[in-house]
Amino acid sequence: MGKTRFNAGKRVITMIDWQNVPAAIWRQNKARLRVVQRIDPIRMDDLLGVDNQKQALVHNTEKFLRGLPANNVLLWGSRGTGKSSLIKALLNAYFAQGLRIVEVDKDDLVHLPEIVDEIRDLEYRFVVYCDDLSFEAGEKTYKALKSVLEGSIELPPENVLVYATSNRRHLLPEYMDENLQSKLVGTEIHHGESIEEKISLSDRFGLWVSFYPFNQKEYLRIIDHYFQGFTGDPDQLHREAIQFATQRGGRSGRTAYQFYKYKGG
């Protein structure tokens, strides 16, 4: 599956059998990619209530696999609505067509250029996956991400895209006083430098896919999907599911799955 090839200073280069390995995770302490042994088996059909988001991401990914121009993707919005699950489902759907995933934690983005160098000349198509991506004031690791998204003096590799999930559209915290820097010039709004810096990062993702909280009808449809074959009172099941969501503070696919596990399947 994977073996150490050589040690370049403190950084260990690992040979991975990408023909049989669908995904790897960057481990900072060992400075290497670790092969993922157990892949989440989630499928596209398991994800309900996100049909438009699914269609957008599938269209972009299929273009990427065919060698056509495709965008880096930012999946942003409400928690528990399927952002991460959709990327995992993509891997299961398109592994046979050459899709591979490299997961990199936000804190490890400083290593991203080196990670990309290891895979840029391979025949497979790689999605660098950053889950729950956001940055606090003063953090600078996003600058490495910027260079990979649009390149520096060297163009980004054609076989690598970045798919990131986040609860924030602009990835960086936004403060009320920063809006005071904006100016109206004619009929156009010109943002201040701090806002422009924040917007510039998310702008490097050519495709934004938005996720919103589920309404009650959609939430109960997901409940019914998980409880196929349920022999009890469906109205009582729905009442319990609604109460569970209320206690959790919101309706989502994640909440529906947690309720399913709570009821014991």
Image (tube, rainbow, N blue to C red):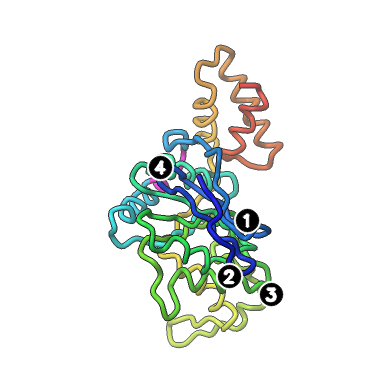
Q: Which residue is mark 4?
A: 51
Secondary structure, mark 3, is: loop
Examine the rendered structure and indicate whether residue 52 appears above or below residue 192: above
Q: Which residue is mark 3?
A: 138
| C-alpha span from label 1 to label 2 | 18 Å
Residue type marked 2: Tyr
Label annotation for residue 27: 1
> Which quadrant of the view contains residue 175?
bottom right
Q: Which residue is mark 2?
A: 142
Mark toward the start of the polypeptide (4 vs 2): 4
> Which quadrant of the view contains residue 6?
bottom right
Please give the name of the residue rendered at 47% of the width and 37% of the height, measured from the top-left corner: 47
Residue 177 appears in the picture as rendered: yes
Residue type marked 3: Gly
Q: How far across and how far down the image is residue 246, in percent?
A: 67, 37
| C-alpha span from label 4 to label 3 | 37 Å
Q: How far across and how far down the image is residue 45, in percent?
A: 42, 34
Residue type marked 1: Arg
